[in-house]
Image (spheres, rainbow, N blue to C red):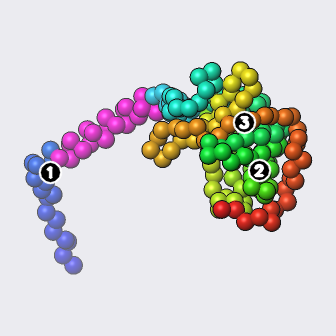
Amino acid sequence: MKPALTRPLRIRPLRIHSLRLSLALWIGLIALSPALTQAETPDAADELPQSTPDVAPDAQAVTDPGEIKRILDDLTIYGRYIDGENWIEYHLPDGRTAYWEKGCTYPGKWWLQNGQVCYAYPNYHDNAANCFILYHRPNGEIQFAAVADAGFSYLASFSLKTAQGNDAALPIGALSPCVGA
């Protein structure tokens, strides 16, 4: 049996240059990776719109999760949408909620995400999450601003009154016989 003949590997100068350049870039990225990973990442709440038209001038945006929870835990809000429709919502400290509008009560959940308060209801609007920037006024009024897909915020609703506990005696946890829009 004859030994296999091998030819020396020939690499063209252009390929060598390209290989060296790729290797240099790769090593450079590895060297910079600690600096890139330690770069300050903006807090999601910092990315919220800086102003919301129609929010009361004395209203302060509340984006701290602990503060939002302190305000909403065990609170009933009697509110009104900008279009004039009234609503009521009770916030249980465990994240459940009971939401009433147009004669129907919907069970749901509320949570905090990226400096906003979010809501979802199993049989209302396909359980889609709706998140809002919470604004709090010195007189206790709460205002909710929504953030549009285009990035601007707008006043969606506001409180008419608030009360501790389930002041409106909304049913908790039972599925609503109402079918959401």
Chain-order first, disc 1 or disc 3: 1
Residue type at mark 1: give it: Arg
Residue picked out by circle 1? 15
Question: Is residue 72 visible to the viewer in this orientation of the structure?
Answer: no
Q: Alpha-carbon neighbours of circle 3 within 10 Å: few (<14), some, or many (≥20)?
A: many
Q: Is residue 103 left or right of residue 150?
A: right
Residue 26 in picture, x, y percent from top left: 31, 41
Residue picked out by circle 3? 159
Question: Is residue 135 visible to the viewer in this orientation of the structure?
Answer: yes
Residue picked out by circle 2? 99
Q: Nearer the viewer, mark 3 or mark 2?
A: 3
Name the secondary structure under disc 2.
strand
Per the rendered image, the range of residues in magenta is 18-37
Residue 33 vs 180, above or below: the answer is above
Name the secondary structure under disc 1.
helix
Identify the residue at horizontal 62%, vertical 42% (top origin): 82
